[in-house]
Amino acid sequence: MATRSQWIAGARPQTLPAAVAPVLVGTSLAYWQESVDVGASYFQPAVALLALIVSLALQVGVNYSNDYSDGIRGTDAIRVGPVRLVGQDLAPPKHVKYAAFISYGIGAIAGLLMVLLSHYYLLIPVGIVAIISAWFYTGGKNPYGYAGWGEVFVFTFFGLVAVIGTYAAQTMHISLPSILGAIVCGALSTAILVVNNLRDIPGDTQSGKKTLAVRLGDNRTRVFYYLCIVIAFGTAAYLGQICGGPKIALLVLLPALVAIKPIAIVKSKAKGPELIPVLAGTSRVLLVLAVALSVAIALSR
């Protein structure tokens, strides 16, 4: 039976910045938008808190779902990553599946409360699609995560949906800044998955998982990782320019210093376990950039 620490590790806390960052950015943009739409009152702390719960629950849910689905398929037999509850026989598969469903349930309840509070009812079908997509990422007979579509899922739901959804739930509309903020978070969240799949290329190839990294190969996957980082910071600088001018644009580029180490490790041709620190490092880049961007946007108001 898995211990509490193993259950926590199975939830992959190192990936949670991908859930926190978009809510921070979306909320800061809603706050900033009040200075553009004079007389408007958009910022809603309760809605933002519920959006955070939804985002965290979806992230934990998809992590447990992946653990369960990969474990029962046996595709976790050759891995160098973090704790796998099912693959390492630490917990019964059905218990891990229940943990995933409980997480999705918490997210669904929080999402419904958020919609009732904000009256932005378009988020109901979006939320349903998000939960279904999270399960079939590695679940079902033909998981799309095994076919190289995982990056699309991450960019869409932990970038576009999370940022724009948080923003729209408070402002009742979508704007260019919210789309740019979504690209920032989506690109870095994608970078986390890219390096995860880069690490797992040998095992995934052997187990028949045709992730995008397997399809691209080692060298091109590394280039894709760099591209995600560049897109994130380039878009963040442009968003800073829109919201507060050149000084804000330069301010949001400071977190690029945090990206130096993970980029250097990837550039060094590190493989397998050597890439594990890059996962945490890229998550840290995402969180630091999101905080810097959110603070800069809020102050520029």
Image (tube, rainbow, N blue to C red):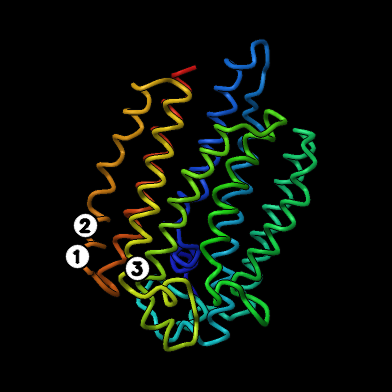
At mark 1, the secondary structure is loop
Which mark, by number, is residue 264? 2
Q: Residue at x 47, y 25 (%)?
A: 242
Residue type of the residue flagged with mark 1? Ser
Q: Position of residue 237 (x, y in %)?
A: 39, 33
Q: Residue at x 56, y 68 (%)?
A: 149
User: Looking at the image, which is closer to me, 140 or 237?
Assistant: 237
Q: Label 1 belongs to which residue? A: 268
Q: What is the CA distance from the residue labelled 3 to the residue labelled 1?
A: 14 Å
Q: Residue at x 74, y 49 (%)?
A: 109
- Classify mark 3: residues with Cα within 10 Å, few (<14), some (14-19) or many (20+): some
Viewer-side label of 3, 1: 3
- Classify mark 2: residues with Cα within 10 Å, few (<14), some (14-19) or many (20+): few
Q: Position of residue 247 (x, y in %)?
A: 33, 21
In the image, residue 6 above or below residue 114 = below
User: Looking at the image, which is closer to me, 292 or 104?
Assistant: 292
At mark 2, the secondary structure is helix
Residue type of the residue flagged with mark 2? Ala
Q: Residue at x 53, y 29 (%)?
A: 28
Residue type of the residue flagged with mark 3? Arg
Q: What is the CA distance from the residue labelled 3 to the residue labelled 2?
A: 16 Å
Q: Are marks 1 and 2 in contact (CB under 8 Å)?
A: yes
Q: Position of residue 194 (x, y in %)?
A: 41, 64
Q: Residue furthest top?
A: 39
Q: Earlier in the sequence, mark 3 or mark 1?
A: 3
Which mark, by number, is residue 220? 3
In the image, residue 33 above or below residue 225 = above
